[in-house]
Amino acid sequence: MPDAAAHWDRLHENPRFRPMYPNENVVRFLISNRTRAGKAIPPRFLDIGVGAGRHIKLATELGFKAYGVDLSLVGLQYAYQRLSKQDVHHSLAQASMNSLPFVNSSFDIVLSYGVFYYGTVDETKQSIAEAHRVLAEAGKLFVVLRTTEDYRFGKGERLGHNTFQLRIEETNEYATVQHFLAEEDIPRYFAAFSHTSYEKTETTFSNHSRLNSDWLITAEK
């Protein structure tokens, strides 16, 4: 299997893979969850797979007490550069999505945008379990996962249930292991949460020849 940290280090060296602006779905989620009813303290926010920091930067601007983790030291360095320009609380650490360096019930809001599907079915489930563990009671998780309708599905060596090591050359994801979710998987994977809702977002590109297809999943502990 490829070295995941080295893979993302290489990508983050390229400005193309350090987007500046947050995803619009993340913007909506954070804006709608930036206050804690009846409490003056700022909500604690965790970005799992912080990358170069576009979403944690938004979180600090919205008043969250923000934390971020990533496998890539290069990505974390760029995230630190972005955040150091602001006089706000933030904390960054190198860590895996499968083993978060935080005690139980540490955060009010957890985000993972396009990260949990990089791995096997067991790694995806473990990442969801870790997000649940570090969420406080009534805390919320927003996670983006790839659907089985995505154009990458099936393009490689099958490693297990809806899981492939990609063999397509036209993407920066060659040789990465990816797990895709069918709709019926969602209730099972998020069964530990008290409430789960989800939507699908899809975008075509390359003259409609390819489809990016993702689940937008919100889960409350």
Image (cartoon, helix red, strand yellow):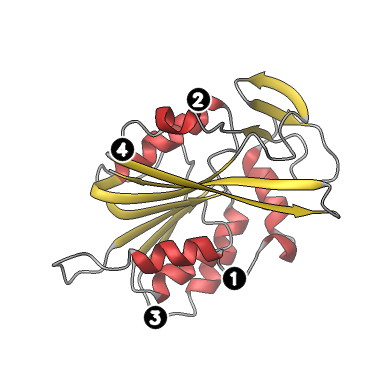
Give the residue at mark 3: 87
Kind of residue at badge 2: Asp
Rendering quarter of residue 108 = bottom left
> Rounded to the nearest whole Å, what is the CA distance between mark 2 and mark 3?
39 Å
Q: Position of residue 132 (x, y in %)?
A: 33, 40
> Rounded to the nearest whole Å, what is the CA distance between mark 2 and mark 1?
31 Å
Give the residue at mark 1: 21
Q: Position of residue 16 (x, y in %)?
A: 74, 63
Rendering quarter of residue 149 = top right
N-terminal of the two: label 2 or label 1?
Answer: 1
Q: Position of residue 24 (x, y in %)?
A: 54, 66
Kind of residue at badge 3: Asp
N-terminal of the two: label 2 or label 3?
Answer: 3
N-terminal of the two: label 4 or label 2?
Answer: 2
Give the residue at mark 4: 193
Residue 1: which disc? none
Kind of residue at badge 1: Tyr
Comparing labels 2 and 3, the label whose residue is closer to the camera: 2
N-terminal of the two: label 1 or label 3?
Answer: 1
Rendering quarter of residue 46 = bottom left
Give the residue at mark 2: 122
Left/right of residue 134 with respect to residue 122 in the rendered view? left
N-terminal of the two: label 1 or label 4?
Answer: 1
Mark 4 touching mark 2, by CB under 8 A?
Answer: no
